[in-house]
Amino acid sequence: MALGPGEDRRRAGRKPSLDPLFQLLGSDLDRVNQLIVERMQSPVALIPQLAGHLVASGGKRLRPMLTLGCARLCGYTGTRHIQLGAAVEFIHTATLLHDDVVDASDLRRGRDTANAVWGNKPAILVGDFLFSRSFELMVSDGSLRVLEILSRASSVIAQGEVLQLMTQYDLHTTEASYLEIVQAKTAELFAAASRIGAVLAGRPPEQEEALDRFGRNLGIAFQLIDDVLDFSAREADLGKSIGDDFRDGKITLPILVAFARGDKDEQAFWHRALEEMDQRPGDLERAIELMDRHGALAETRSRARAYAAAAIDSLSIFDAGVARSALVEAAAFATERDS
Amino acid sequence: MALGPGEDRRRAGRKPSLDPLFQLLGSDLDRVNQLIVERMQSPVALIPQLAGHLVASGGKRLRPMLTLGCARLCGYTGTRHIQLGAAVEFIHTATLLHDDVVDASDLRRGRDTANAVWGNKPAILVGDFLFSRSFELMVSDGSLRVLEILSRASSVIAQGEVLQLMTQYDLHTTEASYLEIVQAKTAELFAAASRIGAVLAGRPPEQEEALDRFGRNLGIAFQLIDDVLDFSAREADLGKSIGDDFRDGKITLPILVAFARGDKDEQAFWHRALEEMDQRPGDLERAIELMDRHGALAETRSRARAYAAAAIDSLSIFDAGVARSALVEAAAFATERDS
């Protein structure tokens, strides 16, 4: 069924938001959150302390929301989505803990990172614990199909993270490589989290595939905007310093666009700052100015919108209704968000 | 069936070894090794490079050997033990990669550690990859029971590693806490790897339990000897520097025994070196001398022998034969080994 005219809220002039999704699924999400708190417990006191610090830090819970929302879209009426939503969030949380160690990040969502508070060692090991817990949750759910989807996603994520490491400081990274990394490190879990909704409801393969495409395109859009916000957000909204990617020498699309469109002098600047990692005061400001000059952030946001549109399109085979509208608006939100 | 008189090789005067187990299962192990190499491949070239460095570094493959040996003991004649042996080794390898980062170790098995060669970041992320791969292997095997055993083991291991971190630099660690850590970080995977043998062969719960006890006691014995060798091995045999635990402020049984049996001056030495971490030239030599004086290493080795004996006892319900003899000798080897 094609999308109804009222479903794309951008047309109505109201800023798209996650509110409809949270209104629809708020009580399910409460149960996911409760289960997350229960299952991060351990007799080893540091584990719930450290995990709780991150879990309570106000993430959007976007990935479990995809599982809940897609299950609802598919008419699923059981309770397994709660457990699997928690499993998906644990995989994500484990990844964040390890990411923050790898990037030596100090701030996430406006709070000190776990590695900043407790050091790298417990952050690595608690990440391993949450990852194991996520598999325990899946095993107690008992679906080999779900285990297959999420174990594959986990291994793709890890490969994406390593690939990202290998393109650091390398301005010859192609857009194709960049997109491959985004697909792996971010979009794969969005795709898996969404696909599970159809699996739970026993929907046919083409609906599984459609939800996979929905999640995958949404995940790419989401990451592109993350990369934009790293250069343009208000720090208070972002909950971390801007310019983290620049300081880490991470080659994201805004940088690739500005580099490709830059003249010789500009390219020399990018080389010095990101390949030689010889960064000086004022370099971040100059990077942002060059991005402005060449429309690099606007270009990236426009690409993100195209991925979000593809995500929305892939929902057209599902029945119209509140669930579909809420997911459509979530996809629109992903590209218009400020934080 | 009780153990036959010929089964405990120590009585025959010959030094116990792993040879009978390797002779019995060599071709199975070759297939496990082949599968390990296949399944650590990735389009991201750094992953097989880094994983291969560790995988090829001549570990004993003790954990997959337990799966293979216990499957054989239970009369299993299929091929699933190959895949599950590889899964068990991947969990172990992932743990080693993260351990070496956490301990900032430079040497393992006589070679530079992965973190020493490639840095911490890829070592963390490739650990995550191998951990995910291990679950992919289990999922493709398709037994929820095995997944349950190994996902639980993984989460217990991570909890043990965190607990170990929390007792570092703390001479008030009790022997009970120390044993709890050893159970979790080492013995749990030995137990799980062994138990799977009975699961594969569809043996009744009491045989599963017996193999779990075998693996668990063997794992404790193995770790106790590791802790002894850290103070007493010839470095060429150990493949790493001796005194690593001491330098890391890791509180192991040899230290707890020497501390408990020491006089005031000696206790002050242990406090300075391990709690204040004010270590000076000659401290390691003094630590070893104090351990000698109080028989701390002999005491630890003697405890290890008791655990190995318990491991051997738990095999008595299985039929005598080459498989049982080889496992008995492997348990004896664990406490008599020099490296």
Image (spheres, coloured by chain):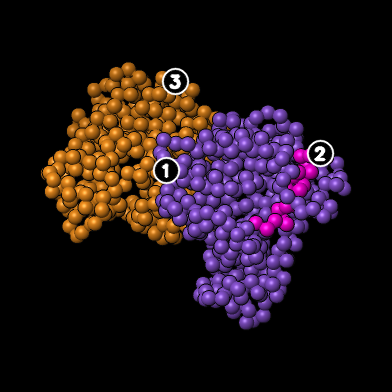
Chain colours: A purple, B orange
Is residue A323 inside the magenta stretch?
yes
- The dominant secondary structure in magenta is helix
Residue appearing at x 65%, y 51% in the figure = A187
Q: Which residues are magenta?
A: A319-339
Q: Is residue A103 left or right of residue B25?
A: right
For disc 1, the marked residue is A46
Crowding at mark 3 (Cα within 10 Å: few <14, some 14-19, many 20+)? few
Percent position of residue A180, x then y: 64, 57
Callouts 3 and 1 close, C-beta under 8 Å? no
For disc 2, the marked residue is A321
Q: Residue furthest top?
A: B1
Q: How many marks?
A: 3
Residue appearing at x 34%, y 38% in the figure = B181
Q: Is residue B17 left or right of residue A324?
A: left
- Badge 2: chain ID: A
**Residue B205: image tag:** 3
Query: Do tags 3 and 1 sit on the same chain?
Result: no
- Badge 3: chain ID: B
Q: Secondary structure at mark 2?
A: loop
